[in-house]
Amino acid sequence: MKLSGILMMGLLVFAFTGLQDVRANEADEAFATGEKYYNGDGVTQDYAEAFKWFRKAANQGDAEAQFNIAGMYLNGKGVTQNYTEAKIWFLKAAEQGFQPARDAFQKISR
């Protein structure tokens, strides 16, 4: 009985770790797809489509995707220009230690 409890705990830890890996992989894939659309790499360049894919990665905590979302709001690429949204997304990425986002947030907050 004690062994099965330890085994169950181990399986739960393994499942949770595996879920984190899947989420990280999904964020990486969404980011990569966003880059392809943003740069027109193998697909027709489409900022709105890039934004959609970056947003998927950003919502999963990808700091670089959050930074890209902020830049797209700042410059009105694929979305309506919105400085408030840009600041929000720069701050999200900055809070994760992404230095370019910290710099951009400080610059836009002046």
Image (cartoon, helix red, strand yellow):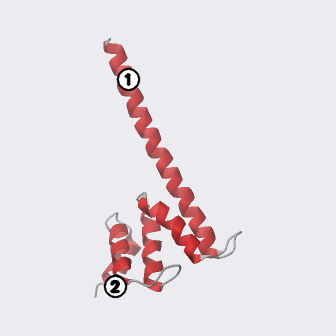
Q: Separation of disc 1 and disc 2 at Cα?
A: 50 Å
- At label 1, the amino acid type is Met
Q: Report x, y in % for residue 78.
A: 53, 79
Q: Which mark is nearer the camera, 1 or 2?
A: 1
Q: Residue furthest front?
A: 80
Q: Residue at x 41, y 38 (%)?
A: 16
Q: Position of residue 57 (x, y in %)?
A: 48, 61
**Residue sitting at x 38%, y 23%:** 8
Say which quarter of the image contains residue 53. bottom right
The answer to which quarter of the image holds residue 83 is bottom left
Residue 65 vertical position relative to residue 75 in the rendered view, above or below: above
Q: Is residue 68 left or right of residue 87?
A: right
Residue 61, given in percent of the width and then of the height, sits at 40, 59
> As drawn, is 95 to the left or to the right of 23?
left
Marking on residue 51: none
Image point (43%, 57%), residue name: 60
Amino acid beneath label 2: Ile
Which mark identifies residue 8? 1
Where is residue 56 shown, x and y percent of the image?
48, 61
Q: Residues within 10 Å of mark 2 (few under 14, many from 20)?
A: few
Judging from the image, what secondary structure is the residue with disc 2 in?
helix
Q: Mark 1 and 2 residues: CB-CB less than 8 Å, in contact?
A: no
Which residue was labeled with disc 2?
108
* Image quarter (top left, top right, bottom left or bottom right) of the C terminus: bottom left
